[in-house]
Image (cartoon, grey):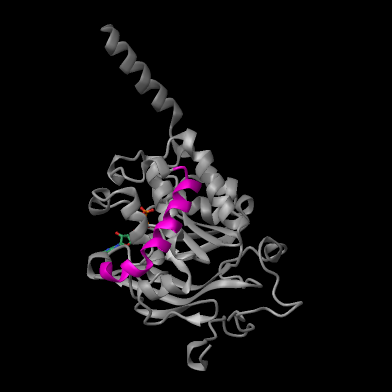
Amino acid sequence: MPADDSINLSKPGTEPAAVPAEPAAGGPVTGKAGLVGLAAEPGVAKPDPILVAHGITRQFGGLKAVDVAHVEVQRGVITALIGPNGAGKTTFFNLLTGFDTPDAGDRSFNGKSLKRSSASRVARLGMVRTFQLTKVLSKLTVMENMRLGATGQLGERFWAAPFRFLWADQESNVTARATELLQRFKLDAKADDFAGSLSGGQRKLLEMARSLMVNPELVMLDEPMAGVNPALKQSLLGHVKSLREEGMSVLFVEHDMDMVRDISDWVIVMAQGQVIAEGPPDSVMTDQRVIDAYLGAHHDTDITELDLEAVAAEAEAEILSERGDSA
Ligand SMILES: Nc1ncnc2c1ncn2[C@@H]1O[C@H](COP(=O)(O)OP(=O)(O)OP(=O)(O)O)[C@@H](O)[C@H]1O
């Protein structure tokens, strides 16, 4: 690794966070074992981080959408990124994967700085994010979507990537990989169908399958359960778990708390652009800061403060008026 490409993104006063390419025997504790006994506090250092973000900010006009002081993602585990609407999760995802540029700060992947890295370079290094099926991608077949995944160029830069002619050489490899993945995700029978004809759950499977075309080390899933019917949820959960079993790291944004509780090894919580809590799912979900953040974002009225007598009187009046015998 070139010397100028490695950075120390650790918090002041702590050990360097950069990850050696090949940990020596007795080196960092990878996977779930490395999370055991960690302090559940924002920015806590992980023993074997695959991804480190430090001092990342992104401002839109007067709004600081992202202001993350320090966060690390442990290798080989499933990490959930949760938070109320508008917390900055998607913006942070875009900043991590090179689809947006931070105003300040840096992130490192496998110890390599991603400063000035394009989304395609980030994907080539092994970090990919899923994309929802846009209108354009819906008009392509399932197999065509898979082939596009091989370029690591999906997203805003998709049409700016005139790489079609380069694919000829690799065509058979790409097709073989796509066919294998479509079989694994049980979408092979749909290979020639338009992606737009797939159900919500099948689209999510396609998004996941497409991201695996580049053999990533870290897969970032954007709301994998959104619009998925209960029958397919279990299948999707199984697929996400199998990524971890194959040694990949998974970071996902999700509003479905059942899924978060079910499959995450670690949860990072954002609110108003900042990481306000992190830890194992059970402890995070009972953390008062997290409850306050969600209540603050979703509810104008605290239900415990309602005047129950007044509500009961109002309900009675409504029932009486419907019966036409209001007093
Ligand atoms: N391109 C943009 N221009 C202006 N404001 C933006 C832009 N992108 C995001 N924002 C604002 O930044 C804040 C964070 O948005 P973001 O979409 O990252 O939140 P989120 O946590 O992903 O929300 P959700 O869970 O609803 O998807 C919001 O207030 C949003 O309106």
Q: Is residue 144 visible in the rendered structure shown here?
A: yes
- Residue at position x 23%, y 65% in the image: 159
Q: Residue furthest bottom?
A: 3
Residue 34: x and y in percent read: 69, 66
Which quadrant holds the C terminus?
top left
- Residue at position x 44%, y 57% in the image: 176
- Residue at position x 31%, y 51% in the image: 133
Q: Is residue 139 above or below residue 59?
A: above
In front here: 101 or 327?
A: 101
Residue 275: x and y in percent read: 49, 65
In front here: 277 or 307?
A: 277
Residue 245: x and y in percent read: 62, 56
Q: Is residue 270 left or right of residue 162?
A: right
User: Ligand 1 shows up in which quadrant of the image?
Assistant: bottom left
Q: Is residue 88 visible in the rendered structure shown here?
A: no
Q: Is residue 146 above or below residue 229?
A: below
Q: Which residues are magenta?
A: 163-186
Report if residue 212 lies within the magenta region: no
Q: Is residue 239 above or below residue 174?
A: above
Residue 210: x and y in percent read: 40, 56
Report if residue 168 lies within the magenta region: yes
Q: Is residue 188 above or below residue 5?
A: above
Magenta segment main secondary structure: helix
- Residue at position x 27%, y 53% in the image: 137
In front here: 198 or 68?
A: 198
Q: Is residue 34 left or right of residue 69?
A: right
